[in-house]
Image (cartoon, grey):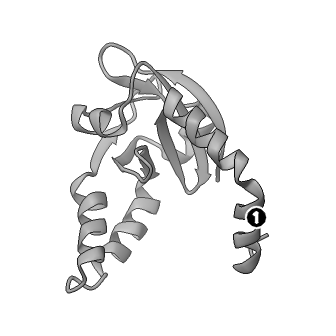
Amino acid sequence: MFIGEYSHLVDEKKRLAVPSKFRVELKNKVVVTRGLDKCLFVYPMKAWEELAGKLGNLPVGEADTRSFTRLMLAGAVDVDVDKQGRILIPDYLKIYAGLAKNVVIAGLYNRLEIWDEKRWDAYKKGAEKNSDEIAEQLGKLGVY
């Protein structure tokens, strides 16, 4: 399970060091794809295969499911984790997420999210401001 929030740097070769506590679960290869809210999602191969299978079985006759499937699957790339625990972020994903040098890697149960540090700070402040409303909605879903 991935949890926590870590500040890291994207180096000049577009490599990003994954926090050491996550490397065991990620092993030697991950999938990086476009995420929601202009971040990147990083999945271990097993979690990605499960998600890709679900996405592949969505009805193609519905425009929303086609769009979401395209966003996730066409935007995905499998990436090796090098011996130093770094992954290479392709240009098109770096541009999509607006990643500068300073990024935040957030652990979210079965995936990691990579955020530009400034965008993460703004997003987090908004979520914290609305935490009462969010908790109420989660309560309606039986989560909180």
Vertical placement of residue 72 versus 143, above or below: above
Q: Where's residue 67, x and y in %?
A: 25, 68
- Kind of element beneath mark 1: helix
Q: Quadrant of residue 59?
A: bottom left
Number of marks in picture: 1
Judge the density around disc 1: few (<14), some (14-19), many (≥20) Cα neighbours within 10 Å.
Answer: few
The residue where tag 1 is placed is 135
Give above or below for 30 relative to 46. above
The residue shown at (64%, 36%) is: 5
Q: Position of residue 124 (x, y in %)?
A: 63, 41
Residue displayed at 76% across by 69% down? 136
* Above or below, comparing residue 42 to residue 137 in the picture: above
Q: Which residue is pictured at 36% across the width and 38% down the height?
A: 97
Q: Is residue 39 visible?
A: yes
Q: Quadrant of residue 24?
A: top right
Residue 78 location in percent, x, y? Answer: 29, 46
Task: Report the quarter where the C terminus lies.
Answer: bottom right
Q: Residue at x 57, y 36 (%)?
A: 122
The foreground one among 94 and 110 is 94
Query: Can residue 142 be spotted in the picture?
Result: no
- What is the quadrant of residue 22 in the picture? top right
Q: Amino acid at mark 1?
A: Ala
Left or right of 113, for residue 2:
right
Residue 35, image x, y percentages: 40, 51
Residue 99 is left or right of residue 142, and the answer is left
Q: Looking at this view, is 41 or 30 the one in front?
A: 41
